[in-house]
Amino acid sequence: MLTKLSGGMVYDPMHGVNGKRRDIYIRDGRIVRKPSANTNIDKIIDVNNKIVMAGAIDIHTHIGGGNINIARMLVPEDHRADPVKRTKNTRAGSGYVAPSTFTTGYRYAEMGYTSCFEPAMLASNARQTHLEMADIPIVDTGAYVLLGNDDFFLRLLSKGADQQLINDYVAWTMHVTQAIAVKVVNPGGINAFKFNQRKLDLDDSNKYYDITPRKILKTLTRALHDLGVPHPLHVHGCNLGVPGNMQTTLDTMQAVEGLPMHMTHIQFHSYGTEGDRKFSSGAAAIAEVFNKNKNLSIDVGQIMFGQTITASGDNMMQYKAHVHAHPNKWVSMDIECDAGCGIVPFRYRDKNFVNALQWCIGLETFLLADDPWRIFLTTDHPNGGPFTSYPHLIRLLMDKSFRHDMLLSLNRHAQKVTNLASIDREYTLYEIATMTRAAPAKSLGLSGYGHLGIGANADITIYTDLKNKEKMFERPEYVFKSGQLIVRKGKIQQTTSGITHTVKPEFDRGIERHLKKYFDRYLTVSLGNFKISDDELRSYGKKTIKIHACQ
Amino acid sequence: MSPLILTLKKRLVTRVDLSSLTPDRLNGLNVNAIKALKLDYSGKQIAITELFDVTGDDTDSIHFRRSSRAFTKIGYAMTKGSIEVRGHAGDYLGQKMSGGRINARGEAGNWLANKMSGGRIDISGNVADFAGAALPDETQGMSDGIVTIRGNAGDRIGDRMRRGLIIVLGNAGDFTGSRMIAGTIIILGKSGHQTGYGMKRGTIILGKKPQKLLATFNSCGKLKMEFLRVFYKQIANIGRRFAHFKDFSPEVHRYAGDSSAGGKGEILIMLHAT
């Protein structure tokens, strides 16, 4: 079947198309060339003067796996307060800050998102993560496996193992957990927490293994570079949320010595200690270094005011944050000596100095970073706020006067210390399309996604151009997933199943000899059961596994 | 004015949420307006008259006749008036209630008086588990008011209870007053295992000596607590069924605990008990 989307204003940054009137033809789930004049077009959809973009990609959102599942359990009131009824096309669900799997998929699709990536899959939780992601309808999914705090890796490192052996271990882990990238959370810090260390700076040593976070970062970035994994090491750095952590962040940026690195939710890592309250914005300094170092990419982790829940593998920092828990309940736990899990419900208040300044710091970062190809739009769902607040965030970026009005309603002391009011930049639709479509696809190496070129997967979102960008991005006119019409006027028309994105770097299978011994001696599952095969992954529900190329 | 009487005329296959039928929510509506209301039932909205015969006009006094265990949330968040239920009163009876009175002439289900903060509930039959308890996410259960149960009660009575009074004339299940923060629970019949598990403060008065108390409760000896004489006298005044409280002796064996949670709570075992 051949479908024509006629007369839309196309924004396709991958091909430099900035608001040009173009027709788009879809056949068998892909975008195709304009057919010859005598070809019969089955369906013509008139999208005259509407904004046409590729389906959006969320590079960092906690949507499946141990963390978010424990978060769901911790806040049943969130689910009781937000029941979602079954409709003809969708299943029932619940939850606002940590929604159930089906609801997650519907809400993403209704906003025009077609791919979402879970950034914190513990290797030992991989099966749970993939099972949950298989439940999430419509959107494509993928996951980043956590390394850097697991016992086996730290043993290798402390024994001074060869980089080749570590590369094999990293690649093996990505294979058996079906991951698309590797993330490190508080490098070495989660492990150090278990040896009663409550702080681990970039050059502090883990008491037991005598390894510094710097060493871990260097080793892992090198490994991913050697293996040719498209997405660089996804780094959740040291000292999250600590005033004065901007220096650590600046040092971390230099620590990898020019190798590519992605620094995630950087807003939480950009705090200074100036001013009467010993809390200030480090966004300007960070943005300056970021702009100069082309090897870096970042996502922001913007906070949004209101109730949310913070879910992180970083139990060292979550343990510190538990005193702020609202409502007062929290979880901090170890998982299989692999990493940790810390869940703290939190309410960001606009009249609170620290929260208001966090909000400003996030926006400053967005507005001062000059390359939308290296900065991605996230709220670190649900840590900064639920993903449903993205349209609001886009309006903040695109509408200067709206942003200034919001700023004036915040805590007055925060208004005085931020330079947000003096920044006039407004994001353009082209830049938004870059940071939510083209750039994430490029960074993750998703060939055929995030753009509207010939042969691309027909994930297309079509908006009505409204002055109020929040309204515009909240409710797309049409959303196509692999060529099928999923959403019309913000309502789900049909549900489909997305695919799983992975990469499979080459490695020496001999690594399993070392691992077998380790598994038999220390772990609760055997090596054979630890692995998730392609067949098993398909049996969960998402039938297609797309293996992207390593360079 | 005659009481508003709702008589069930159908066998229910799924639960039906009756939180909209309270004196507060129906205030000012006439019979025709009430008959026009809709209820969520079996996945769709249906007219109230499909389930109930509706007669009477006094919305301050609502009677449910031929009640069913598929009912939920009778008296939800009510602040005034009275509700009488004949038959099984269902789950969540009196949830978030802050005033008024519920009289259930029959049994009641789980989560009786959840988050109740005032008013009074009398049950003449047995109740299931979690009477006056907190839902899984809640840090506090019942926070004021009086609940009386003439029959037996299930497990976890007053779990995380914060204030108020629960009286059970029959027997109680396990974990009575678990994680209790404050308030008073009286069980005249037998009580199950783990009474007072994790209680911080508050008082549990037992009419019969339990088979076993937790090791984290320490005996403070046999005492004559004059306060109890005053307290029992007050209880004797709340209704005919409680008149015998005035004859109770104030002598009790006091146990302090749960020492694993601060140990400021107490279990008082009446001495005339065996």
Image (tube, coloured by chain):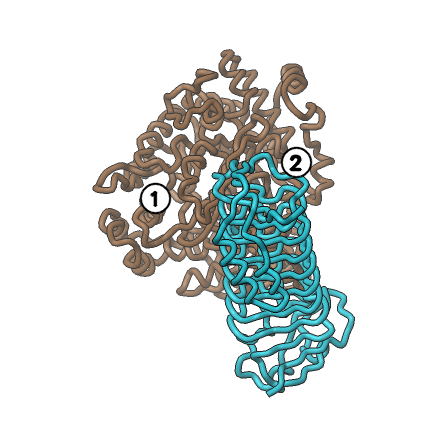
Q: Residue at x 45, y 30 (%)?
A: A186
Give the letter of the brown chain.
Answer: A
Residue A133, above or below B44: above
How dense is the environment of label 2, judged by Cα within 10 Å: few (below 14), some, or many (20 and up)?
many
Residue type, label 2: Arg
Residue in the foreground of this view, choosing between B9 and A59 = B9
Q: Colour of chain B?
A: cyan
Q: Residue at x 28, y 53 (%)?
A: A411
Position of B161 with respect to B195 (left or right) is left
Residue highlighted by disc 1: A365
Snapshot quadrant of residue B168? bottom right
Residue highlighted by disc 2: A127
Instruction: Name the chain under label 1.
Output: A
Image location (x, y in percent) of residue B109: 68, 60
Residue type, label 1: Thr
Residue B244, above or below A237: below
